[in-house]
Image (cartoon, rainbow, N blue to C red):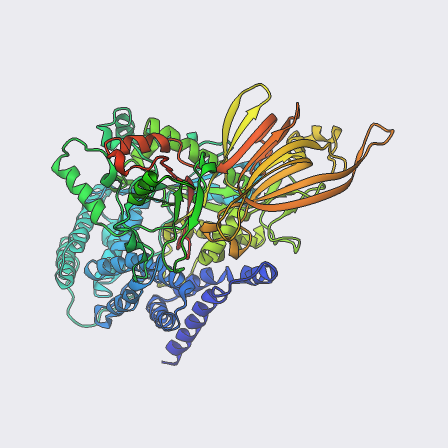
Amino acid sequence: MEHTSCTEDRIQHALDRCLDGLRQSPTAAHRWDVLMCSVGQSMNRWSLEELVKRNPDNSIILLRQILRKTKEVQERCQYELVAPLAVTFASTLLQTPYCPPDTELLERAMEAFRGFLTWPEPYCSLCRNLLSTLQLEIKAPGISFQRLVREEQDLNTSCQSSKTMTVLLMNPSEVPADFLSVAEQLSCVQHSEKDAYVTLIKHAFQSTLGTKYPLCKIHSTLQAKDVEELREMFSMVSGVLETAAAMSDPLKGRGHVIQELEGLRERLSLPASNGRKCDGKLQTFPIPTAKCQMFQWEKDNFDVLNTLLEDEPQDLSTSEHPKEDEDKVDIEDDEGHDTLSVVSESYAPSFNSGADSDFFEDSDDSVSSPKPAKSPARLSQHLYRLLRKPRSLNRTKSLGYTESKDFSVVREIRSNSLPHHVQLRSPEPSSSQALQNQTVRQVCFRRRPILSCDEDDKSATLRVVVFGADHVAGKVARAYSSLRQKENACPRLSRAFKMQFYFVPVKRDSAAGQACLTSPSPKGINDVVSPNGAEDSTNDIAHLLGMLDPWYERNTLSLLKLPASIVCQQTSKTETESYDSSYEQRLPILADLVLYYCRFAARPALIQLYQAELTFASGERRTEVFVHSLELGHTAGTRAIKAMGTASKRFGIDGDREAVPLTLEIMYNRVVISGRSQCKKESKMCTSVNLTKACKNPEELDSQLECLQLSMTEVLKRQNGKSKKSYNMQLSLTEVKVDKVQVSGAADTTFAVCLDQDEKKVLQSVIRCDVSVCSKPDSASDWRRRRAEMSAQIQPQHPTFCSLLCLPIVTFSGALP
């Protein structure tokens, strides 16, 4: 008893350390201190798992401690701890050897987490998913473990053909050698098919029957079988679990599994239990390392992923011949895409009802033109998509309409717990127009992009894990935008996979030309400063994700602040009799980090994309996408010089005082808290004009205030000496928050533009640059097509379709409100 009590205290203390500090919301002044504290805390989750592995009973103890903590969270309304507790409970349950039904632990867990269903998003959805898992585990013990391993190892059966592929994208020149080595180890791990079948069959026996039959005897019996016979047995076990999971009565489901496993026991010629306590011992089965593939990735596209289609010949062939119009790919359709809802005023009051919810149910089909009759199967599928759980509604500002100069944004004062939206209207409508505008109301909001032709039909999930700093995030943004356009024209990857994007930040050391995983300096959390004062490389996007999701910050961002020697070192195996390490290949902590992130992060946070419409001196026009920053003038030119490598020494790198000023016409739309945009037009002599996503402070996370930080380095006084070189004597830095900018070179002035701090994305000889929020390219045509048959009396004179394009990066909880 004393030993058990001591173990419970140690696990409770370890759990508290995992959650410690998540309730803090640090200001910019104290973020450094909090970050350095969280560097040590980032190891707590890994240490807790190592502690649980030492004894199979520790899993049950941890589950009980999580339930204890969950009740405290409910009583104290600690919102920020809901996601960590739900994720930790799910990950612990996944590796729990046996949960005795007489303890009713899972039933008590359902009662505890059911209380969060009345909480706002994303807490209710997180707990709803966990409740679904608990229901399945009560009916079919161990089914979550079985499904995960089956999908990651591509063990198809007659009743289950889904699989999950994990792809690691990185540039070898921008990640440390140790980091690259870990990725190569992950991609080289192979588990034999026979070992996988043996492990899963043993796991099924133990999850359902506990220690009734010794695992050692089951193991030796299964090892004597050939692969074909094991595959047939595994297929039978999978079918039994899936059948039980589909039953409505939990007792019947569990009884069905027990009956069928007893039949398999007789087939294996194992002696029956004498009813007395068995000498068998529980064993903890580690999750086999997922199959991963590593690709060297340097370009602004995802063309490298097309090689995966070589294993998907059926999907590849069907992609060339779409079935019908309704099957055409809409990469941001279904459960969430950037769209416009046209809501009748008669229904408008429903937004302001007393319900404290962040949901709004809508359907694109409700405003679409009539379509041919569908088959019963497709009709039932559409009914399912209409009736399933409500969709998350993220607040946003209407920034994407390119002709919005004639419109003003009107905000509505609403409860912070309710979804905010904006209304676009003509400033001075006539009486007849006013009558029309009262009939229809435009509501613009961001919804979760789904890169899929039909999400519900996908049997394969593709995890795309990208490593890098903000310049790599920019590559992901441009690759995502390009992929979206390609898939819309000819669906290929989206027909074969449900795609999910993960981002693991890596700090780039510009001085060495490589990335590093080291502790940051007090100058900034993640800044590398160049001689001219500009930041060579940042990790602002990753820190934005960390502020949106504290569990991402704790388990993905902060862990990388540890030295590479710790993160990438090989860990030792857990040497205990109760831990089955026979097939486990112990990998560095970094590998565990990546797999934990991929397996238990399931909700995307939307990162707004921006577009730059560039006009060159030659008359060419081009539109580029960026997610973090756009640099114009001297800062961009400096990056172009650095990109030359050793040849850059001949040119030297001058600061702003030595830079040649540019005469520019700058027009921008200033963002103010009141919501009334202020348009200004100025003529300035500047060395640099930089735009950066405003995302460094917690107060900037409100999507209503989505904007860019405009920084203009203006030359107030310049000395023209007798020598060839002149100097800028007096400089002034002006910073303004904007949502739209237009920069034009006066006379024959041209300038350079750099996107997302990427030296390889520097564009020269630009004479005009128009920056605005990125919207869906075909939004205007979609508006006409979908509204073609609507009555003219209910359509406004100037339809303002606002379809914002966002980059979905998967996090554990999504964006917290």
Instruction: Return the residue found at the far front.
Output: 431
Q: Residue at x 22, y 57 (%)?
A: 136
Q: Which corner quadrant holds the C terminus?
A: bottom left
Which of 644 and 278 lies nearest the eye of the viewer? 644
In this view, the residue in front, 509 or 357, is: 357
Tell me, yes or no, if residue 154 can be seen here: no
Q: Is residue 90 visible?
A: yes
Q: Is residue 669 left or right of residue 229?
A: right
**Residue at screen point 50% across, 43% down:** 467
Looking at the image, the residue that sits furthest to the bottom is 2
Image coordinates of residue 453 in percent, x first then y, are 29, 35
In the image, is 215 to the left or to the right of 444? left
* The one of 274 and 371 positioned closer to us in this rendering: 371
| Image quarter (top left, top right, bottom left or bottom right) of the N terminus | bottom left
Quarter assignment of residue 155:
top left
Outermost top residue: 618
Q: Residue 411 location in percent, x, y?
A: 42, 51
The x, y position of residue 789, in whole percent, is 23, 32
Left or right of residue 354, residue 758 in this image: right
Q: Quadrant of residue 764?
A: top right
- Count of numbered circles on the image: 0
Q: Is residue 354 above or below residue 726?
A: below
Q: Position of residue 816 (x, y in %)?
A: 42, 57
